[in-house]
């Protein structure tokens, strides 16, 4: 016992791959003992947690809103309702569950309902989030976004336990709110531009599924309608501008698109030896876009100084297909093969034009075609050499072809410009799996790949990856450590691109008794990239320089849970995230010859820490009082504009019956 305690305490300070930061509220519904009630042929379980949130912020409130965004006020923190049929043979309802979280002006609200019976299954998911991005690091703070996103999904299965099933569904996504951006066109220098964001996406689904012994075939038809209506303007009639300069701007770019798609899935099992499955999807998108931008100013404020117009109709058919086979000729040997193909084409009539009224100059770019086709095959095998040793290996190959056509209008005398680029990627992987004493597992993997002609300068060309993980697991203790190394070299037209990432992590979980559990994790991620860049400065092309970025990210967390039964439940937690960057303290002292904004963007050192405490005390068999506190501390090393310290908390009452 003493040895186990020492090992676990050591692991706490080493800790493993840091998990996502969890909010202090609502309270875990499993904290208390829910007895339930009987109502006719059903058993009922219910809980409601209502309370008050409070928050105080020192420093940048905008940065806090972009990361946590919790405020003050009354909240329905969570609700839970479940009804179960006692014998599972009710005519219309065997099971009903409803769960909600954050209702009552929380920035992240959600609800889910699920209904089961022998005739149908219905699932509803609804989410709403308030998204705020202050954009403090761009255009001197003149970029910002404050929108609300609403998402809902409905899925229905008729005759879920039968061999033939009918599938239906509906999904809706909407985003609306205010945005602030900038315009630099014709005399503008960081002029604020207001935009009213309005986006809406609706999808309808209808299909069927046939299931038999070892066979499953599913066909689904979908229809999607997407619309974006986000006009932007900066109208300042009384403002003055230098001769030929602009002092007002308008932009309108409505976009509408419809997509009809087919999805096919077929699965066939031949005993334990062979499993075959295939997928096919085809989607045809038709879109209409119209963009009109106008800049106004002197000497004739009523007439646009500069106009940009874009109009067009386009289609984008997409085809995706894959076939998979899992073959186990003998118990110790398994081979998996996947053949895949996908193709995307964008074609239509499109015209882009620019008109400067002051000089009567006009430029136009006409229809453009873009097509991407990919075909690939990968084969992987697992061989059990001994009861304690497995060997894995595989070979992957993929070919991509990118085509583009820049075509003039039919009545133009210009010739079409056609371009094509192809590349082939080969990769091999190998690995070993060791098992010792039924408690220790060791995994080692390696991969090597080459690409003849990547499309993008930062794409994989000559790369390798190394992975390893070791794990010890007993009834009360889990210890694990992992390591991953990736390296990529791409000799591009603008210069060599090098990228290397190394990740290491350790984790521990200990539950010596039912009333206590400890979890800890630590992870370190190192990222370093170097690439050639080219850009325009004062209408001149600048090339031959390099872009550097370096990150050394450390993350860790520690969680302690104590359950004193009828007295109290306590949960303590601490999360810490720190990017040490390249160790610099001044933003302009960069790597190599880079200076100015390029040097300042080579690294992004910061620190984020968040301790929290949560307490739950039973006030009876069905009532609990809950309270929690959480602190957020965020600090950037190279700039203090976004630094903040915030304290949030809540107090609530949970009623379970």
Image (cartoon, rainbow, N blue to C red):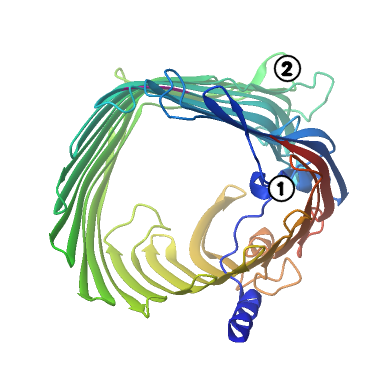
* Residue at figure coordinates x 71%, y 49% from the top left: 23
Q: CA distance from mark 1 to mark 2?
A: 46 Å
How dense is the environment of label 2, judged by Cα within 10 Å: few (below 14), some, or many (20 and up)? few
**For discs 1 and 2, the disc positioned in front in the rendered view:** 1
Residue 359 included in the magenta stretch of the image = no
Task: Name the secondary structure under disc 2.
Answer: loop
Displayed quadrant of residue 558: bottom right
Q: Are marks 1 and 2 in contact (CB under 8 Å)?
A: no
What number is the disc on residue 549? none
What x and y, as percent, mark residue 596? 69, 62
Which numbered circle lies on residue 300?
2
Q: Secondary structure at mark 1?
A: helix
Residue at image location 24% in from the left, 27% down from the top: 163
Q: Earlier in the sequence, mark 1 or mark 2?
A: 1
Q: Quadrant location of residue 300?
A: top right
To which residue does mark 1 refer?
A: 67
Q: Residue 62: x and y, percent? A: 79, 44
| Vertical position of residue 535 compared to residue 38: above or below | below
Q: Quadrant of residue 655?
A: top right
Which is nearer the eye, 300 or 575? 575
User: Compared with residue 410, is residue 242 higher up or lower down, i.e. above or below?
Assistant: below
Visible residue check, residue 259: no
Seen from the viewer's position, the closer of residues 242 and 85 is 85
Indicate left or right for 272 with 302 as reference. Answer: left
Q: Position of residue 564 (x, y in %)?
A: 74, 59
Which one is in front, 649 or 450? 649
The magenta segment is 166-170
Q: Residue at image x 42%, y 18%?
A: 91
Rendered residue at 26%/30% (across/down): 218
Left or right of residue 320, residue 90 in this image: right
């Amino acid at each position: 016992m003493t040895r186990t305690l020492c090992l676990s305490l050591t692991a706490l300070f080493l800790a493993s791959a840091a998990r996502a930061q969890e909010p202090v509220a609502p309270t875990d519904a499993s904290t208390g003992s829910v007895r339930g009630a009987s109502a006719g042929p059903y058993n009922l379980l219910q809980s409601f947690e209502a309370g008050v949130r409070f928050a105080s912020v020192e420093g940048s409130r905008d940065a806090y809103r972009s990361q946590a965004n919790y405020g003050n006020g009354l909240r329905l923190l969570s609700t839970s309702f479940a009804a179960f049929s006692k014998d599972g043979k009710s005519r219309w309802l065997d099971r009903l569950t409803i769960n909600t979280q954050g209702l009552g002006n929380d920035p992240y609200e959600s609800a889910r309902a699920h209904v089961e019976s022998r005739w149908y299954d219905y699932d509803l998911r609804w989410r709403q989030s308030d998204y705020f991005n202050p954009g403090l690091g761009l255009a001197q703070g003149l970029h910002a976004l404050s929108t609300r996103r609403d998402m809902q999904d409905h899925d229905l299965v008729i005759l879920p336990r039968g061999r033939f099933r009918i599938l239906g569904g509906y999904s809706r996504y909407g985003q609306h709110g205010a945005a602030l951006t900038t315009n630099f066109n014709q005399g503008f220098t960081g002029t604020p531009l207001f935009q009213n964001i309005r986006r809406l996406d609706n999808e309808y689904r209808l299909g069927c599924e046939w299931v038999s012994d070892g066979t499953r075939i599913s066909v689904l038809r979908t229809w999607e309608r997407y619309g974006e209506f986000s006009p932007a303007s900066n109208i300042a009639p009384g403002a003055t501008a230098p001769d030929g300069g602009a002092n007002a701007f308008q932009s309108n770019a409505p976009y509408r698109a419809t997509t009809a798609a087919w999805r096919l899935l077929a699965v066939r099992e031949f005993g334990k030896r062979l499993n075959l499955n295939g997928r096919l999807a085809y989607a045809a998108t038709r879109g209409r876009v119209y963009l009109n931008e106008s800049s106004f100013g002197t000497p004739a404020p009523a007439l646009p100084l500069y106009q940009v117009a874009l109009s067009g109709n386009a289609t984008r058919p997409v085809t995706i297909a894959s076939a998979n086979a899992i073959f186990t000729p003998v118990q110790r040997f398994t081979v998996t093969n996947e053949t895949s193909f996908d193709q995307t084409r964008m074609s239509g009539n499109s015209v882009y034009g620019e008109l400067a009224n002051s000089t009567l100059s006009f430029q136009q770019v006409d229809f453009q075609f873009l097509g991407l086709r990919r075909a690939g095959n990968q084969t992987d095998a697992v061989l059990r050499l001994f009861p304690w040793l497995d060997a894995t290996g595989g070979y992957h190959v993929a070919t991509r072809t990118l085509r583009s056509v820049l075509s003039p209008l039919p009545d133009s005398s210009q010739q079409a410009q056609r371009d094509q680029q192809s590349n082939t990627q080969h990769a091999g992987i190998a690995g070993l799996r060791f098992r010792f004493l039924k408690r220790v597992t060791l995994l080692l993997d390696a991969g090597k790949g080459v690409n003849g002609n990547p499309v993008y300068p930062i794409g994989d060309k000559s790369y390798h990856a190394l992975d390893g993980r070791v794990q010890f697991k007993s009834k009360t203790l889990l210890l694990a450590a992992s390591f991953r190394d990736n390296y990529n070299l791409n000799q591009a037209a603008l210069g060599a691109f090098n990228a290397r990432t190394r990740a290491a992590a350790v984790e521990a979980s200990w539950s010596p008794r039912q009333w206590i559990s400890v979890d800890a994790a630590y992870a370190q991620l190192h990222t370093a990239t170097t690439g050639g860049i080219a850009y325009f400065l004062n209408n001149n092309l600048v090339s031959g320089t390099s872009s550097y970025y370096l990150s050394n990210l450390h993350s860790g967390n520690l969680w302690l849970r104590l359950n004193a039964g009828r007295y109290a439940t306590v949960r303590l937690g601490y999360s810490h995230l720190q990017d040490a960057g390249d160790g610099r303290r001044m933003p302009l002292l960069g790597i190599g010859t880079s200076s100015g904004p390029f040097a300042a963007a080579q690294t992004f050192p910061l620190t984020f820490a968040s301790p929290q405490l949560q307490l739950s005390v039973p006030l009876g068999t069905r009532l609990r009082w809950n309270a929690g506190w959480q602190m957020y501390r965020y600090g950037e090393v190279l700039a203090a504009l976004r630094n903040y310290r915030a304290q949030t908390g809540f107090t609530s009452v949970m009623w379970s019956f």
